[in-house]
Image (cartoon, coloured by chain):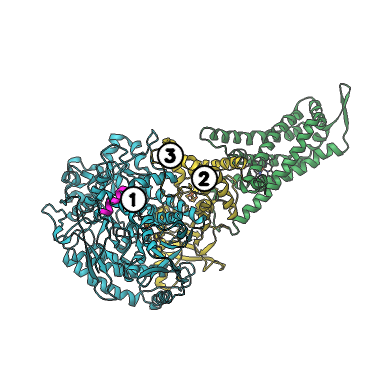
Chain colours: A green, B yellow, C cyan
Amino acid sequence: MSWVSKTLNSTLGKKLLMALTGLFLILFLVVHLAGNLQLIFPDEGKSFNIYAETMATNPLIRVVSILNFGFILLHAVYAVILTRHNKKSRPIGYAVSKASENSTWSSRSMGILGTLIFIFLLVHLRGFWYELKFGEVPMVTYDGVSYKDSFAIVSAAYQNILYVIFYVVSMGVLAFHLSHGFASAFQTLGINHTKYTPFIKKLGLAFAIIVPALFALIPIVMFIQGS
Amino acid sequence: MNLTLKVWRQQNPSDKGGFKEYKLSGISADMSFLEMLDVLNEDLSEKGEDPVHFDHDCREGICGMCSLYINGQPHGPTQTTTCQLHMRSFKDGDTITIEPWRANAFPIVKDLVVDRGSFDRIIQSGGYVSVNTGGVPDANEIPIPKIIADEAFDSATCIGCGACVAACKNASAMLFVSAKVSQLALLPQGKVEKRERAEKMVAQMDEEGFGACTNTGACSAECPKEIDLSNIARMNREYFAASLSTEKS
Amino acid sequence: MKLDSKIPNGPLAEKWTNHKFNVKLVNPANKRKYNIIVVGTGLAGASAAASLAELGYNVQAFCFQDSPRRAHSIAAQGGINAAKNYQNDGDSVFRLFYDTIKGGDYRSREANVYRLAQVSVNIIDQCVAQGVPFAREYGGLLANRSFGGAQVSRTFYARGQTGQQLLLGAYSALSRQVANGKVKLYPRTEMMDVVTIDGKAKGIVTRNLITGAVESHSGDAVLLCTGGYGNVFFLSTNAMGSNVTAAWRAHKKGAYFSNPCYTQIHPTCIPVSGDHQSKLTLMSESLRNDGRVWVPKTVEMAEKLRKKEIAPKDIKDEDRDYYLETKYPSFGNLVPRDVASRNAKYVCDDGRGVNETGEAVFLDFRDAILRDGEDAVRGKYGNLFDMYEKITGENPYKTPMKIYPAVHYTMGGLWVDYNLMTNVSGLYALGEANFSDHGANRLGASALMQGLADGYFVIPYTIGDYLAKHPNEKISVDHPEFKKCEEEVKAKIQNLLSINGSKTVDHFHKKLGKIMWNYCGMARNAAGLTKAKEMIKELKKEFWADVKVLGTGEELNLSLEKAHRVADFLELGELMVVDALHREESCGGHFREEHQTPEGEALRDDEKFAYVAAWEYAGDGKEEILNKEDLVFENVKLTQRSYK
Ligand SMILES: Cc1cc2nc3c(=O)[nH]c(=O)nc-3n(C[C@H](O)[C@H](O)[C@H](O)COP(=O)(O)OP(=O)(O)OC[C@H]3O[C@@H](n4cnc5c(N)ncnc54)[C@H](O)[C@@H]3O)c2cc1C
Ligand code: HEM
Ligand code: SF4
Ligand code: FES
């Protein structure tokens, strides 16, 4: 076995992949959020549409987005592998367990949280990415250049209250995933120090609250604006 | 005080096993948890029933032999070993559920006794400094900064009880393994082999069928010796550095 | 039989060096042909097994715990002595030798003790090289403290967990040899008997504690490293499983048992709190460096304390009797263990004990906390204080600790010569299981030293001499002697299981413990001992008629394990009493009330008793035969110990 596959096949190596892909996804969340916040700029979707077009055509962005899909898949695949391995490591469970005494709920529920995120991602991609890429999208023209009116698709979708609720709940799930995942990734990478770890933990918590909250804000605002 | 015990009874590894309920009275708050079980066993023996088998030896919290998952927590509600747990931590009328450590790598032997040989095999895979007896330098030849020595000592206090595995939702042995990897990686004497050691011990840990680490921290929160999670981070570092740098694959 | 201690000739300081040169060596290529059986994986056993395997011998190592790392050595707290003189306070090999001989009340062999002091320095080097994290100073060098009666700081320590760290070091060396294929481990395996063929130890018979299988193992030599027998008292600071079985069965196969009555009672243990008590917990002796021992001056005040009408802090200094400090001004609270223990007994017998049972004295840190601050005290003793609080529910930073003596260590054990071989060829005893180095009383921090000295630095040399002279002949475990021995063991198991009486094993053990503590404990006298002998005989009879051992022999069966051990304790107890009765003097841990100075100190009789008593088993129900090894002192002058 080559050293690469040996390392990556160990439990530590698998976790390393989780952490690296997880951190990449965290970065992606930031970029994605920056773009999405333009949805609620009071300019009838102009800046968002321009942004969406750039995202869809810029070759560099395209590479990154393919990577991103790959990483989500990798993260999910390894999540499944690890979670199954971990379940096998304790074939018979305890009759009484007071796990809340020693660990947080989110840390123990990464698998379920991740699965929910995965479902969300599927719905999300089907609803927007697929629609925008392969569906019928109306066009708008700004300064003589015509763009796909992505904004119209999004704001249409956010008129459905069920859709909005699904979104908001999913962001809640993401928040819990991140509340453990953010700091955990650093620990996995071996970054633990009495000076910095408390800061990383706080930053992680802040990130886990703020980023999903802002994501959730978008459909809510658009729903209110639309009705 | 009066207590109801629900104890896991299992005749042998292949037996299915199940809980049995016992009533105990006249337990004093000054008793240790194991002394309370001694009372139960004396009762059972007098009645001609097979006593409850459990592991213990030093009863001082240092040999790491005692185990028991008590009311949903390894070593019970306080952060000590079961032998150092005292009945003052319980109330009159309590029901106490006692289970064995549960992990694929800790098969049950009988009742509450499990086989922790996997821990020994992990140490055998590399938990040592390769020096023979004799021919070593004078003990004061290599000064070691006090903070380093103290930190190594903190890691070295692990008693190999397995509570970390029992507590972890994944039955992961990361805390135990990392404590040894850390102790030796910190000290100049152990540094020489730190890379190979990390690789070998992790490989053995995986082979024994322990789970992976989700960094929940349950291990450290339940560890009677308060082994810190930073040990796990250090092992991760050592392991990745080793993978990138050791020459043999 | 004449006992030959095989002490090498020549001046004391050169004996060991000369001996190492004179012993025969086994050719490196031949070493791998020899099989060595090591029973016990404590400091002595693990260090011996690892060192012998490193040399190339094949080793089989046995212990009854689930892992070698759990041997009772793990519990040692205080530290380990070595004549390094790192502190420049006047220590030397000779001083450590002298202190050990004197501390042992002149009942040990000069040559052995000198060798022990010599190799002590190598032990520290070895352990540091293994990664044992000893305490260090800010400059990065090793720290030392003074311990149990020593006037120099020669004790190395790892917080309050020295034994743990040393054992884990030895265990790691052992584990390395397991990985190398040179050591085969047999955990959860109890040695049931030694097998001798033509007068030579050739193997052992064991019981697999999980499956109950009775099995034979053959080897070219057998090393018993099975620890002490303090649990004969039921309550002691030993681990629950500590036992005499291995040594006792060897004794019954011809090995002499020496000085069984020398037991050490440790002064600083947590007092007994009730009948349910299963073991006693030691608080490290190092506490006496800063803690002051006292009881109230009057019985009235002590009574008020017992009834909890007053708290310790309500007692003014002038009403406190710091009895060790007044009686022994130069040593104060640091007098040797036996002196400290006996004095605690006296003040309690006097009615001035301070807890409900009246059997406890105070160990007070008030002054140390005032002088150095609570943090400094926590730094030194934090984990001990925590342990105390966990067990008793009292906070020693706020209120003085309560302590009382408890059985702790047994100086007696299998008789061995300078090579650590018993009088049975090829059968060795190491560590606490032998009688060798501590005379009638062991100094603090010297047992760890002895165990590791025996295992790392003595046996690797001395065993070669025997093996070289005995070309190895593979003896199959099908040999009739092995089969016979297996049958005997099985019969004994069957016998125990078939009695099906009405009393549990613990019932007998507790009873035996009471007899031993009352009549063969801190102070002994002829009348009491004579009575005890009869009582034990009775109890033994009752045991074999009325013990109840449940379950079968073919499974993990804790009551069967205990029954074997208690059966042997009953026999040992009787021999201890016989030994104590015959030794008409007081020395170290053996205090005969008939023999004391006007000040109540132990009064030796060097004329008559400067010898090692080596008891020879004479058959079931027969009185054991006394053999004597005279102790010759050429380098120290015998003096009455005085700690005034
Ligand atoms: C609480 C406490 C504190 C102490 N503190 C100190 C201290 O600070 N300094 C100091 O120098 N000394 C101290 N001592 C004494 C010292 O710890 C012991 O004397 C020493 O560790 C004994 O080591 P050992 O290797 O001879 O035996 P042990 O460590 O007792 O090992 C015995 C081994 O034999 C095995 N065994 C026993 N019987 C059988 C059998 N029938 N079959 C198979 N295996 C068997 C056991 O499994 C075990 O592996 C202390 C002792 C106690 C009790
Ligand atoms: C935007 C999406 C996501 C982000 C930002 C993210 C981030 C993270 C991070 C940072 C970690 C911590 C890694 C570590 O402990 O080293 C993590 C762990 C985990 N993630 Fe995700 N994740 C995302 C999506 C998913 C998805 C889709 C799944 C599942 C299908 C998933 C399942 C898991 C699981 C199971 C773990 C825990 C693994 C373990 O330690 O056992 N995650 N995630
Ligand atoms: S790390 Fe803690 S819980 Fe795990 S084996 Fe060591 S002492 Fe026990
Ligand atoms: S019995 Fe030794 S740690 Fe509990």
Q: Chain of mark 2?
A: B
The image position of residue C263, as x and y in percent, is: 26, 59
Q: Are marks 3 and 1 on the same chain?
A: no
Q: Is residue A215 in sight in this rendering? A: yes
Q: Are marks 3 and 2 on the same chain?
A: yes
Dot 2 falls on a residue whose secondary structure is helix
Dot 3 falls on a residue whose secondary structure is helix
**Residue found at x 59% / y 52%:** B206
Q: Chain of mark 3?
A: B
The image position of residue A91, as x and y in percent, is: 60, 59
Q: Residues within 10 Å of mark 1 (few under 14, many from 20)?
A: many
Q: Which mark is residue B181?
A: 2
Residue at mark 2 to residue at mark 1: CA–CA distance: 27 Å
Q: Are marks 3 and 2 in contact (CB under 8 Å)?
A: no
Q: Which mark is residue C449?
A: 1
Question: Horizontally, is C611 left or right of A206 in the view?
Answer: left
Residue at mark 3 to residue at mark 2: CA–CA distance: 14 Å
Instruction: Name the residue tied to disc 3.
Output: B149
Q: Are marks 2 and 1 in contact (CB under 8 Å)?
A: no
Residue at mark 3 to residue at mark 1: CA–CA distance: 22 Å
- The residue carrying mark 2 has its beta carbon less than 8 Å from ligand 3: no
Q: Amino acid at mark 2?
A: Val
Look at the picture and state if C597 lies above or below C132.
below
- The residue carrying mark 1 has its beta carbon less than 8 Å from ligand 1: yes
- Please identify the quarter of the rendering in which residue C560 is found: bottom left
Q: C361 and C124: which one is in front?
A: C124
Q: A218 and C95: which one is in front?
A: C95
Please state which of the two labelled residues, at mark 2 or mark 1, is closer to the viewer: 1
